[in-house]
Image (cartoon, rainbow, N blue to C red):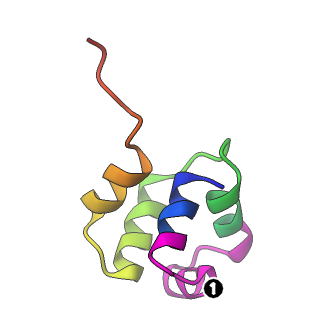
Amino acid sequence: MTRLGEYLKKKAISKATVANRTGISRSRKSELTNNPSTHLKAKELYLIALAIDVELNEILKEVFKEVKLLA
């Protein structure tokens, strides 16, 4: 499971609901939440934030929490 998948699971958000509200297909949504090698597009993340009514920065911080600047 990806960090996005974990985030949505923690928030108890239905994949089907997100797919319906965003226009992101269920198959793409499944890839985004289950396949760690899938690349998430900024537009997709923004649509998901709108669909679940959370601030974009909240999802960004959770999904990309391992990203750090080089020392």
Residue at the spot 70% in from the left edge and 51% down from the top edge = 35
Task: Say left or right for 54 vs 46.
Answer: left
Q: Is residue 10 magenta?
A: yes
The magenta segment is 9-27
Camera-nearest residue between 38 and 36: 36
Q: Position of residue 23 (x, y in %)?
A: 56, 79
Residue 30 falls in image quadrant: bottom right
Residue at the spot 52% in from the left edge and 53% down from the top edge = 3
Residue at the spot 38% in from the left edge and 33% down from the top edge = 67
* Tally of numbered tags: 1
Residue at the far front in the pictured view: 10
Residue at the spot 54% in from the left edge and 61% down from the top edge = 6
Q: Main secondary structure of the magenta part?
A: helix
Q: Is residue 57 above or below residue 66?
A: below
Q: Is residue 21 magenta?
A: yes
- Quarter holding the N terminus is bottom right
Residue 36 falls in image quadrant: top right
Q: Secondary structure at mark 1?
A: helix
Q: Position of residue 62 (x, y in %)?
A: 38, 53
Residue 64 falls in image quadrant: top left
Task: Say left or right for 18 vs 29.
Answer: left
For label 1, the residue is 16
Q: Is residue 27 above or below residue 1?
A: below
Q: Residues within 10 Å of mark 1 (few under 14, many from 20)?
A: some
Residue at the far top in the pictured view: 71
Residue at the far right in the pictured view: 27
Amino acid type of the residue that numbered disc 1 sits on in the rendered structure: Ala
Q: Position of residue 25 (x, y in %)?
A: 67, 75
- Quarter holding the C terminus is top left
